[in-house]
Amino acid sequence: MRWIWIDKFIEFESGRRAQAIKNVSLAEEHLHDHFPGAPMMPNSLIIEGLAQTGGLLVGEHNRFEEKVILAKISKAVFHFPAVPGDTLRYTTVIDAITDGGATVTATAHVGERLQAEAEIMFAHLDDTNRAKTLFEPKNFVFTMKLLGVFDVGRGSDGDKLAEPPGLAQFRSEAGPGQ
Amino acid sequence: MPSKEEIYDKIKHALVEALGVDEDEVTPEATLVGDLGAESIDFLDIVFRLEKAFDIKVPRGELFPEDILTNTEYVRDGKVTPEGLKQLRERMPFADLDAFSSNPNVKDFGNMLTVQDMCRYVEGKVGVAG
């Protein structure tokens, strides 16, 4: 299973904000255990989806040259459970971004209803060998392409987002359909 | 320019938010690691909050000089060398390093920085009224 907890970006404004959606479906196996007879999307995975939406926004800002990791959830409030059939809309806005990392404010909505609010902090990993082994930035780029971010992405100047260097080569290595 | 009290109150608020501690736990003498339970990742959080609250820039390593403490040139056998201590004093004029200097174990360093040190650091950055 790929650890991807967003289905698609619907808005991506470089360095500022990003929106992604996640469709909650009974075809997802984990919902049958959480909970039997009362399926609901685990809030921990909603946090993961918010962090992926925000993490790619932060990573793209630095052209994926920094290794972005989820460092801390300063705040998380959930107002009601998301259930099969719901479409979660994740919105993340960058509050601050520095050499050391970034903070984003994140919300999840079902329709117009506010489902979750969170503050998420990311750290940039040092460029050590250990960090390089743990995390390959090209994986992130690959995920971004998969989620259609470059189809909807806009740079801070309003122009269409350019693909990061090396992406075309990576796609050809990854094979057709990627 | 803010007063000392205004600076202290804002720092207190930042620490309560970043560390999840009660307001009455934050005192000028409280150490960030020992008394307030800050972990390394919290320092990045605290820096973000200070930058926002005071509209300042906190360059990496200025408030928490991890680059000196992980540099083999300045650390031998788990202790900061005299040259390393000199670097720390230059970097951190806002902190009282006398007690640490007498037995400069790197692992004790994190337990040295107090809320008051942080206030002095911000006062040096933004200036103080009165």
Image (cartoon, helix red, strand yellow):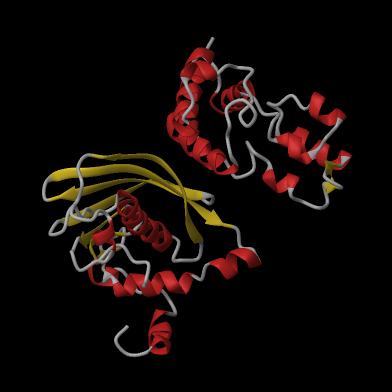
**Residue situated in front as seen by the camera: A117 or A33:** A33
Q: Residue furthest front?
A: A36
Q: Residue at x 37, y 67 (%)?
A: A3
For the residue pair A84 and A114, the one nearer the viewer reads as A84
x 53%, y 19%: residue? B25
Q: How many marks?
A: 0
Q: Viewed as shown, does residue A93 lie left or right of B121?
A: left
x then y, percent, for residue B34: 65, 29
In this rendering, the answer to whether A148 lies above or below A173 is above
Q: Where in the figure is residue B20, as x and y percent of width and height?
A: 46, 30
Which quadrant of the view contains residue A55?
A: bottom left
Left or right: B11, with B75 as reference point: left
Up-down: is B40 above or below B98?
below
Measured from the top left, where is residue B1 in percent x and y? 48, 19
Residue B57: tell me if it is visible: no
Give the percent coordinates (x, y) of residue A9.
25, 64
